[in-house]
Amino acid sequence: EVQLVQSGAEVKKPGESLKISCKGSGYNFPTSWIGWVRQMPGKGLEWMGIIYPGDSDTRYSPSFQGQVTISADKSSNTAHLQWSSLRASDTAMYYCARHQGRLRDGFNLDPWGQGTLVTVSS
Amino acid sequence: QTVVTQEPSFSVSPGGTVTLTCGLTSGSVSTDYNPSWYQQTPGQAPRTLIYNTKTRSSGVPARFSGSILGNKAALTITGAQTDDESNYYCLLYLRGGISVFGGGTKLTVL
């Protein structure tokens, strides 16, 4: 079974750093794009960016470029999303999702992780 | 910046048919945008319904179908059930690895 399991909920203060994770299993992790989606409280889904673990090729939405860092460790089949200095506005649920498909044609997001709730509050 | 548009809300009667759409503020949606559709109920992770414009994901009932209607991508639910009351999001591929979600449609079945 193809599965993505995310790390647990986090509560942080503004200015702190954070790295959350998403572990894939049941498929060839290095050869499939994987990405992150933000959902702020009561709001819709926002596509953040993707990474190809095989060579770490990373693409960011212009809205998130420079705000977060996406990385992947193919030796542990784990993708990461990190912040160097959190803000209250980063409070959201973050989902990882396998991006099936090719850069030339586009992707199908499946499966999805269960989500990681990040709360940033002083 | 590219903005993907969806109806904020829609209502359908049980057993009825509803078509949700996904457009662009500038330009037309075609199969080149590889539209996909996701269903999300409150408190749950999204679930894939349709990808590559019209391919149903594994386990998705046949009452869900995808298409291009005019200049928009469309998700049609034929014979809506109360379980279909959810938020629906479309995703368009803009090339260069970048995708964008629409704002979502809240579907009420009553």
Image (cartoon, coloured by chain):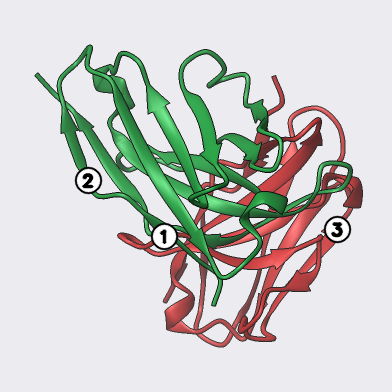
Q: Which residue is mark 3?
A: B68
Q: Which residue is mark 1?
A: B45
Residue A45 shows in this picture: no
Q: Nearer the viewer, mark 1 or mark 2?
A: 2
**Foreground of the two, A65 or B37:** A65
- Give the label on residue A79, or none: none
Quarter of the image where one finds residue A11: top left
Chain B, colour shown: red
Q: Are there few (<14), some (14-19), or many (20+) residues within 10 Å of tag 1?
A: some
**Quick one: SS at disc 2?**
loop
Above or below — where is B58 with respect to B76? below
Q: Are there few (<14), some (14-19), or many (20+) residues within 10 Å of tag 3?
A: some
Disc 2 marks a residue whose amino acid type is Ala
Residue B1 shows in this picture: yes
Query: x%, y% of residue A58?
Result: 66, 29
Chain A, colour shown: green
**Foreground of the two, A55 or B51:** A55
Q: Residue at x 20, y 39 (%)?
A: A10
Query: x%, y% of residue A98?
Result: 60, 55
Disc 3 marks a residue whose amino acid type is Ile
Q: CA distance from mark 3 to mark 2?
A: 39 Å
Mark 1 chain: B
Above or below — where is B38 with respect to B104? below
Query: x%, y% of residue A90?
Result: 32, 25
